[in-house]
Image: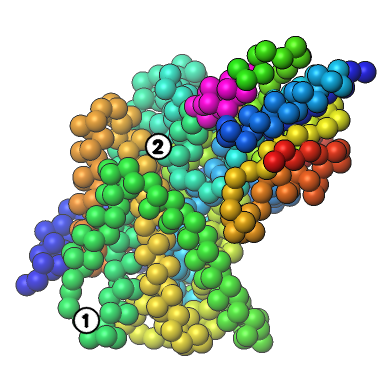
Amino acid sequence: MDIDEKINEWVSPATHFIENIVFFAVDINSVGLPLVLVWLLVAAAIFTIYFRFVNLRCIGQALRIVRGKYDDPSHDGEVTHFQALSAALSGTVGLGNIAGVAVAISLGGPGATFWMILVGFLGMSSKFVECTLGVKYRTIGPDGIVSGGPMHYLRTGLTDRGWPVFGKILAIFFAVMCIGGSFGGGNMFQANQAYAQFHSVAAEFGFDGHYGWLFGSTIAVFVGLVIIGGIRSIGRVTRILVPFMCLIYVSAGLCIILGHITDVPAAFGLIVTSAFAPEAVGGGLIGVLIQGIQRAAFSNEAGVGSAAIAHSAVKTNEPVSEGLVALLEPFIDTIVVCTITALVVIITGAHLNVGMEGIEMTSRAFNSIIPGFDYILVIAVVLFAFSTMITWSYYGLKSWTYLFGDSKAMDLTYKLLFLMFVVIGSAMNLGAVIGFSDAMIFAMSFGNIIGLYIMMPEVKRDLNGYLSRVATGEITETR
Amino acid sequence: MSTTYLVGVDGSDHALKAARYAAEQARSAGASLVVAHAIDWSGFDIMGPEELAERHKIKEAELDRAQTKVIQPVLDTLADMPLEVSTDVHHGHPAKTLLDLAEQHGASHIFLARNGHTRLAVALLGSTAHSVIQTSPIPVTVVP
């Protein structure tokens, strides 16, 4: 038994245990429907209706805000809406869009794409609520450092309503789950899929051994240099390269789609018909639905609360304006990027290959049209994985210091644990990693969404106030 | 209406020289002088969440540094000149920020130092003086 198998054997029982708790399912037509997915979907639908389709009617305003049209010149030098959005996107755009879509299609069929797009659309409203609250309840410490996110709005928001204990419990619950999420989806899943792509390319050159632990250790060293060594130049280089890789990926996807434009109507037709087809793969309609919701929610993290941590740093007097910018996140992440991946996979017929899982399917799809794209993809996924890890290590650290205090020893403990999970994630099987990653990320939504429900009337008042001031010209474009 | 001149400074010796020249011109014209400094910054730079959280603190540190390392040396060098001098520091694209500040202060003339960059650097990156000359609606004097 090699090292990878040993790590997998040791860790899998624990991850399965956690997965079974979070994904408690009810049987519908002999298919288990995990209640946490219903929880996320229903919340997104309720927010969409309650805020009267804010995800549709405010897109234009969101784009104007992110372009800096409303930026106050006296705030120059502070964090802008664009910067907050791009930082939050660095935590979500990545392997969820490349590998996650393929996982959804391989397990749920092409119809899963339909549900992914729908969840992405509804998720825009969840993201709006949580990020508005993230800015509204953030704190600026005596050292000038901004802290925000669900821990803060759950505790303070509910304390303001006379429920201090409940608020504290929800905040602690969120923080614990966020630490788990930072080890799972924000780390192990990234490391695992980056290695999968690396391994498939390396195998072409005859390196077909299982050296996930070695790959993970190498990545861990680089992540460690940034988060422990404070060598920010590495992080900075990554952040500059990631948007380029994103552009290359999206352009390549669009080229393939445009090159097969005549197949696109049929591909969309297949997506829609198989979304509702009872004979769809893996448990009929419910089976497809589950895969679509699960992978979309994992990809855009709407309702999970993670992005509110990054968005809270923006300098604005109008928290709603940041909420509106945040709703672009699921739009870019799920509706645009995931749909491109799905169309490429379906048009090229890569989803018909049996036995291929995750990123290998996406890689095969791109490679069939653009030979050699798997080499570009390996660079892209390693960079995406790296930037997502750096972002999530920050989310996890903020939760960790919220629970255990802000000391150097505590800080280092978390970071060492984080690095350990990079190695574990690279060595384990995809199934076990996805199970754990999903479980922790989705568990974050339990406490977060309860808080969002309680505070949504407040957000509605703020939204209406903001929009009426824009309409009357009290809030005007400054640039 | 009183006349106002603006001099852009960047902490270099060239800038000190330009500031003195601008002050002499302002004195002989009976104008007041605005000593302006732009801290290079773009709202479209991509940052990580940790840098975002620290941004406010870093901005304050940048403003402090600008005051002590860039503005104060200029004020010291102009201390002996009988002249009304005010200062302004702002974040943004250097050339655009200087032009915006000139407009805000109602300046009728901009003074700048010719910077010490190599020709290659100027060819690749451009220079603040070049950009200001090309886009300024008011006269610009570049001090060698």
**Residue at mark 1: chain:** A
A101 versus A370 height, above or below: above
Please say whether residue A460 is visible from this viewpoint.
Answer: no
| Picture residue at 29% right of the left edge, 55% below the top | A222
A379 versus A169 height, above or below: below
| Picture residue at 46% right of the left edge, 16% below the top | A162
Left or right, residue A431 beside residue A325: left
B4 versus A197 height, above or below: above
- Please provide the residue range marked out in magenta: B61-75
Extreme residue in the right direction? B1
| Picture residue at 58% right of the left edge, 53% below the top | B118
Observer-nearest of A263 and A410: A410
Say whether marks 1 and 2 touch (CB < 8 Å).
Answer: no
Quick one: SS at disc 1? loop
The N terminus of chain A lies in which quarter of the figure? bottom left
Is most of the magenta stretch helix, strand or loop? helix
Please say whether residue A373 is visible from this viewpoint.
Answer: yes
Residue tagged 2: A447
Residue A356 placement (x, y as % from top left)? 34, 80
Observer-nearest of A415 and A224: A224
Q: Amino acid at mark 1?
A: Phe
Extreme residue in the left direction? A1
Residue tagged 1: A207
Query: What number is the disc on residue A444?
Result: none
